[in-house]
Image: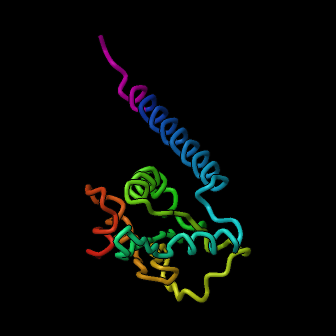
Amino acid sequence: MIMDFSKLKQKTLELKNKAVEMKDKAVEFSAEKISQSWLVLKEQSDLESLIWKSENKIITSKEWDEKIFVKRSILVVWNGEKDFFKEFLISIPVLVTKSFSQSLSIKILDINNKNINIAEYNIDDFPALVVFENKEVYKIITWEDNVKKVVKSLNLDINRAIEEI
């Protein structure tokens, strides 16, 4: 049996192109759904609410001992016009799981959202992961590699990952 390699090559390229097209459609669909979800900040009041969730809690025991529970909130800021968000899509469930395990609030913000002003937080580079503690900016982690390190860390303790960067 003689095999026509040019036809085989053509079929392979068609399959590859179809797979790439399907992947791109899936990423676009996911990005659209996430941009409409509870994870994405839409108004300035949403950002203020996230920051308020970082307020430390003081608990007084029966013996009148006070214990401070440090609270943090995380804001992932990215430029929606760049490809980082599409690459970051796969990491969102991991980041949400890590934040849930540490009782952290997490939200995502596109810098192109004109309803939210983040100028006062001095975020110069995007993407950035902004950590709020006790209603103040605790740490800003910038550069794609550093943000990905926090997300890709195998440890569920996101606070430790934040401290290590």
Up the image or down, 42 lies above or below 66; here it is above
Q: How many marks?
A: 0
Instruction: Give coordinates of residue 56: x percent, y percent.
Output: 46, 75
- Residue 52: image quadrant is bottom right
In the image, farthest residue toward the top: 1
- The stretch drawn in magenta includes residue 4: yes
Instruction: Give coordinates of residue 8: x percent, y percent.
Output: 39, 26
- Residue 154: image quadrant is bottom left
- The magenta segment is 1-9
| Residue at 44% across, 71% down | 72
Instruction: Give coordinates of residue 16: x percent, y percent.
Output: 45, 37
Left or right: 92, with 152 as reference point: right
Q: Nearer the viewer, residue 104 or 18?
A: 104
For the C terminus, which image quadrant?
Answer: bottom left
In the image, farthest residue toward the front: 63
For the N terminus, which image quadrant?
Answer: top left
- The stretch drawn in magenta includes residue 162: no
Up the image or down, 101 lies above or below 125; here it is above
| Residue at 51% across, 63% down | 106
Instruction: Give coordinates of residue 6: x percent, y percent.
Output: 40, 30
> What's the coloring here?
rainbow
Up the image or down, 135 lies above or below 149; here it is below
| Residue at 68% across, 76% down | 116
